[in-house]
Amino acid sequence: MATEDIPVIAVDGPGGAGKGTVCQALAAQLDWHLLDSGALYRLVALDAMRAGIDLDDEAGVTQRAQRLDVVFATDGRISLAGDDVSEAIRSEGCSQGASRVAALPAVRTALIDRQRAFCRPPGLVADGRDMGSVVFPGARLKVFLTASVEERARRRYKQLKDKGIDVSLARLSEELGERDRRDAARAVAPLKAAPDAWHLDTTGLSIDAVVAQVMSWAVTAFPELNLPGKGME
Ligand code: DC
């Protein structure tokens, strides 16, 4: 199958809009591959921090990003240079670090081929900020998920609380706002919906409702696949 014929669903939007959970559910339902591109930026940040490289040192961070020794296991675990970092990359330090390295143009370029390599039959669900606009501009279904900053902070708060991590809701909301501003203001691939993306505000919607909506768009976007019509009525 030629790469351009491989079906791709590009899902973009700000942090906490539900992309991660929704993309996992979509990939599982469709039995397609999953690209968590945010994890790659988190890995670059963690790797640079561990190597003692300043996150503003574009050449230094890029050099390491080009050689990043990462394994995405089929069970969802992620390892960096043989070390399981699945939890470590979700820390607030890595969130902020990822947002900083993601603003470096050479780092973004260094990660493009690595991201495109995830596009393999039978299909790909790609989760990120620039999936539809830069990495997979030919994706036949582009989705832009949003939610209010308060709702996104509440979701993150609950996730952390469930993991036994104590944080302040106000602080999370502030940090999310700060990341949003940095992600939207950067010169290269800022967070912005592709012109042909379908928008969905997930505030107040359950994960199942969001997945059902995207599946119903997928039924229309990929008619030749005869996907089961699981859309919302
Ligand atoms: O989705 P996430 O929270 O794991 O992403 C971590 C950071 O990486 C976030 O601040 C934005 C950045 N990012 C990006 O710039 N481009 C992507 N395709 C994915 C994430």
Image (cartoon, rainbow, N blue to C red):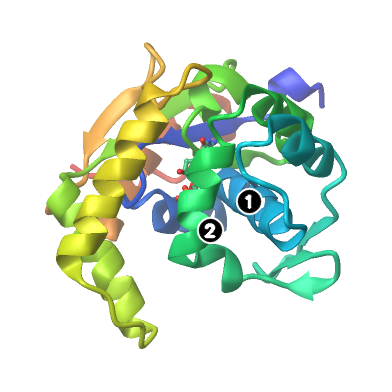
Q: Position of residue 163 (x, y in %)?
A: 39, 83
Going from N to C along the chain, the mark reached first, 2 or 1, is 1
Q: Give left or right: position of 29 versus 210.
A: right
Is there any visible trace of residue 6 in the rendered image?
yes
Circle number at residue 45: 1
* Image quadrant in which the N terminus is located: top right
For label 2, the SS is helix
Residue sitting at x 67%, y 71%: 85
Q: Quadrant of residue 65?
A: top right
Where is residue 215, by image quadrant? top left
Label 2 and label 1: CA atoms lie apart by 6 Å
Determine whether the beta carbon of the residue marked 2 sits less than 8 angstroms from the nearest atom of ligand 1: no
| Residue neighbourhood size for the residue with mark 1, other residues' Cα within 10 Å, grouped as few (<14), some (14–19), many (≥20) | many
Task: Name which residue lies at 66% across and 46% down.
Answer: 54
Q: Quadrant of residue 191?
A: top left
Residue 94 tag number: 2
User: Measured along the vertical axis of the image, is residue 4 above or below residue 215?
Assistant: above
Q: Are marks 2 and 1 in contact (CB under 8 Å)?
A: yes
Of the residues shown, which amino acid type is indicated by label 2? Cys
Residue appearing at x 45%, y 23% in the figure:
186
Q: Quadrant of the C terminus?
A: top left
Residue drawn at (59%, 31%) of the image: 8
Q: Secondary structure at mark 1?
A: helix
**Amino acid carrying mark 1 in the image:** Ala
Count of marks overlaid on the render: 2
- Could you say where residue 172 lies in the image, as x and y percent from the top left? 25, 61
Q: Report x, y in % for residue 104.
A: 60, 28
